[in-house]
Amino acid sequence: MEKKEKSQAQKLSDKLISNHRNGGLILSDEKLKKADKFCEGYKEFLDKAKTEREAVIETVAMAQKHGFEEYVQGKKYEQGDKFYFVNRGKAVILTVMGKKPLSEGIRLAAAHIDSPRLDLKQNPLYEDQEIALFKTHYYGGIKKYQWTAIPLSLHGVIIRADGEKITVNIGEDKNDPVFCVTDLLPHLATAQMKRTPAELIKGEELNILVGSRPFKDDDISNKVKLNIMAILNEKYGIVEDDFISAELEAVPQFKASDVGFDRSMVGAYGQDDRVCAYTALEAILKCKAPKHTCMTVLTDKEETGSDGNTGLNSSYLPYFITNLAKTYGLEGYNVISATECLSADVNAAVDPTFPDVTEPRNSSRINYGVVATKFTGSRGKSGTSDASAEFVGRVRRLFDKNGIIWQTGELGKVDMGGGGTVAQYIANLDMDVIDVGVPVLSMHAPFEVTSKIDVYMAYKAFSVFFAD
Ligand code: MN
Ligand code: MN
């Protein structure tokens, strides 16, 4: 067919009117294959790193394979040197020294590796109706009803009375048992279904089923509980009081999977924000001889507001940069002020089943690439850093110049709700920062969905930022 000459209006429209398109229409088949292949490694990471502690262990193992060494405070590093610093086993900073002096600032990517889940209480184990259960206190923002009647695995650490640390990971291996929160059968749920959705399952009803067989004895009460403690004592050498000094997290047991007949999407637990953690990690692992010093920080506690000594509202990141700066005779705050940051976190993708909560002109869509979010927050931009037009312009030019498929997106309609990221805490340090990440469907649900194109574009976006 003969190609029709474009009309004057079409030419003008091409020039003047915004035309972001589905990445599936833009990328060559070869690039699409690359995106799919990249996500194979991503899915493996998701299965190995279901908690912040496991994400740190996996990150360090991957970093060591790529020649990163453990950071030595006071050491003067040369350009091209690669090192990692672990904060209390729950956060990690990876650095590649650049050609330019540190006084010209750092290219920083910051993602979080904690995800919503059910934490065990400090006195978790009890028996009721000859059934043993764990009491929980949920972590992060969840719709509680989503966490019933799905298989859960248990991850974390127990510090015994003798000080020994026991690592727990049970439910992931195919020979392991799993756990679950029970829910009421519909036949008897008449009263439950009259509750408001927020109370459909109450916080104190998120009790995890852990056993039902009694210890064979006629005298003692709570025989099922005793039997569970006997099993735990044999396996881990623990007694009940050891739970007090434990951090045990119940997370969805299922593995990461391809979603859709076309396998275009990834479904898994904890993609907020391990999708940005993995892509920012891969970008720094592959970062070679950068101009500026590059850094990826994978942090904890974002889902509970970034407070605590492993969250980005603490001083561990500025302290680390200050220590590094000192070895070159520089003031830490000067390096921090010259630093640029991509706050790598997810955004809410438009959901065709629930379009009313998003404003179509200003919301992210899956397959439209990585999302640059100028501001988050809620109720009149409260609780946000709001990147400057200058810095958005800088990131926009960088992405366009390097063929990154990207879009802008706001977290839902005005006054519909909202949320925050680590960007505000980074901005408060006097850095330029903008949120850049992957659009997600079913965010904070036990099974979240992302598009492989967007995951790959996030990796590309962090890579070009590091190379710039
Ligand atoms: Mn997040
Ligand atoms: Mn989140």
Image: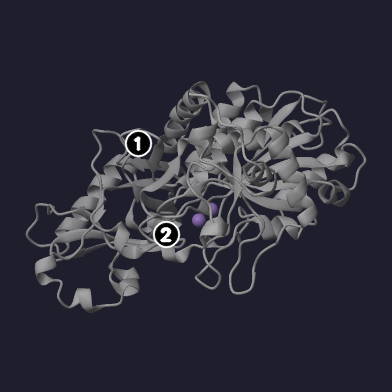
Hey, which residue is sitting farthest left in the picture?
Answer: 218
Judging from the image, what secondary structure is the residue with disc 2 in?
A: helix
Q: Residue at x 69, y 27 (%)?
A: 287
- Front in this rendered view, residue 217 or 367: 367
User: What amino acid type is highlighted by mark number 2?
Assistant: Ile
Q: Which residue is mark 1?
A: 257
Judging from the image, what secondary structure is the residue with disc 1 in?
A: strand
Q: Which residue is mark 2?
A: 244
- Front in this rendered view, residue 398 or 300: 398
Q: Position of residue 205 (x, y in %)?
A: 28, 68
Quadrant of the rendered image containing residue 282: top right
Point out the tag, 2 or 1, that comes first from the N-terminus. Answer: 2
Dot 1: within a 10 Å radius of its alpha carbon, few (fewer than 14), some, or many (20 or more) residues? some
User: What amino acid type is highlighted by mark number 1?
Assistant: Ser
* Whether residue 466 is situated above or below residue 90 in the rendered picture: above
Side of 187 where 413 appears, left or right: right
Q: Position of residue 385 (x, y in %)?
A: 70, 62
Label 1 CB less than 8 angstroms from ligand 2: no
- Tally of numbered discs: 2
Quadrant of the rendered image containing residue 166: top left
Quarter holding the C terminus is top right
Side of 257 where 30 appears, left or right: right
Q: Nearer the viewer, mark 2 or mark 1?
A: 1
Q: Position of residue 283 (x, y in %)?
A: 63, 32
Q: Position of residue 449 (x, y in %)?
A: 41, 45
Side of 253 where 91 appears, left or right: right
Label 2 CB less than 8 angstroms from ligand 2: no
As measured in the structure, the alpha-carbon distance from the residue carrying label 2 to the one carrying label 1 is 35 Å
Dot 2: within a 10 Å radius of its alpha carbon, few (fewer than 14), some, or many (20 or more) residues? some
Q: Residue at x 60, y 28 (%)?
A: 63
